[in-house]
Image (spheres, rainbow, N blue to C red):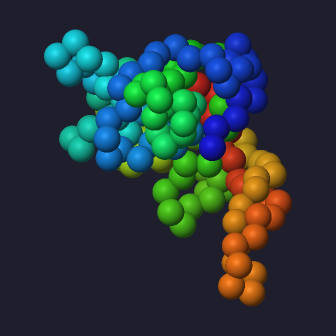
Amino acid sequence: MINFKKGPALSLHQVNFIGKAVDGEDIEAGHVVRLNDNNGVVEVLKGASSSSVSKDAVYGFAINNQDAGDVIESGVIGVYALDGASVIETDKLPEGSVPSDYALGAQVTTNTAGEIITLPGGFTGKVLGQVEGYRDLPKTTTIEVNGKNVKVQGLVSFLGIKLAS
């Protein structure tokens, strides 16, 4: 999920880029994505390339799930670019990590899965922003009760990131 907390990005319908939703990427809203020019067709791919978080690539945050009806119908996915001013919140962290694992002010980047990670030692790639804070927000989840799937109101932890440019 993605949430816009502060700055000019106050609408989930505001996008800076659109691109072809590449099959098999399984992009969800809040994933870090990068744009790729494939013979004149702009593709949206999840996270960093396998080799690095290139300073030259265009990164942003997906505002749609790849399996959402609008994305399936249009074939494109919306991307909010790094604007240097907004604070976005995302729940896309590596499995087992929680937002409190990220120190306030720590610089962050992405991994190949489109998740937010802190900068590894000797990092020379693209910095996406810095940790602004974290909080829990309501989210509807599905749990199994007596063999039946039931939707309940739960909480999801979001990491706030002050975007770099």
Q: What is the quadrant of the N terminus in the image?
A: top right
In the rendering, at what x and y percent does residue 76 appear? 43, 25
Task: Say which residue appears at 38% left-offset and 39% top-offset.
Answer: 46
Q: Is residue 51 left or right of residue 73?
A: left
Q: Position of residue 111 (x, y in %)?
A: 38, 46
Residue at 56 percent of width and 17 percent of height: 15
Q: Residue at x 17, y 16 (%)?
A: 39
Please say whether residue 40 is visible from this viewpoint.
yes
**Position in image of residue 51 (x %, y %):** 21, 41
User: Is 69 placed above or below 157 here?
Assistant: above
Work out whether 78 lies above or below 159: above
- Direction from residue 131 to residue 108 in the image, left or right: left
Q: From the viewer's perspective, is residue 79 above or below residue 98?
A: above
> In terms of depth relative to the viewer, which is nearer, 115 or 164?
115
Q: How many marks?
A: 0
Residue 50 location (% of width, % of height): 24, 44
Extreme-left residue of the structure? 39
